[in-house]
Image (cartoon, rainbow, N blue to C red):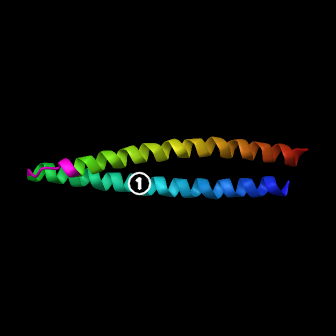
Amino acid sequence: MEGLWSLTTSNIKKAGQVERARQHLDQAVARLEAAVDKRKKSGESGDRLAEEMEMARSANAAMKKNNDSMSIHLDGAINRLKAVLEN
């Protein structure tokens, strides 16, 4: 039972780290979008910035997918732990 608890605790910590990383990435994407908007308004070319923003969006989508997957695994681990504790 101790091994199961350690695994669950580890998964919870990883999920928190993934969530914090996702939030940081969301903030970075928002900053990039604001910078692109600013450049568009000033008439400057934003091709490079637009490429970086697209890369950030792709990375953000991957992080969200990983976060969703982690949530599913955590829910399963929590449910297994509850079942062990109830028996």
Seen in the image, is 13 located left or right of residue 86? left
Residue at image coords 73%, 46%: 77
Image quadrant of residue 25? bottom left
Quarter of the picture containing the C terminus is top right
Residue at image coords 54%, 54%: 18
User: Outermost residue, right direction?
Assistant: 87
Q: Mark 1: give few (<14), some (14-19) or many (20+) Cα within 10 Å.
A: some
Image quadrant of residue 16? bottom right
Count of marks placed on residues: 1
Q: Position of residue 27 (x, y in %)?
A: 37, 55
Residue at image coords 17%, 53%: 38
Q: Position of residue 22 (x, y in %)?
A: 47, 52
Seen in the image, is 82 located left or right of residue 70? right
Q: What residue type is labelled 1?
A: Leu
From the viewer's perspective, is residue 32 above or below residue 65?
below
**Which of 57 and 75 lies nearest the eye of the viewer?**
57
Magenta region, residue range:
43-48
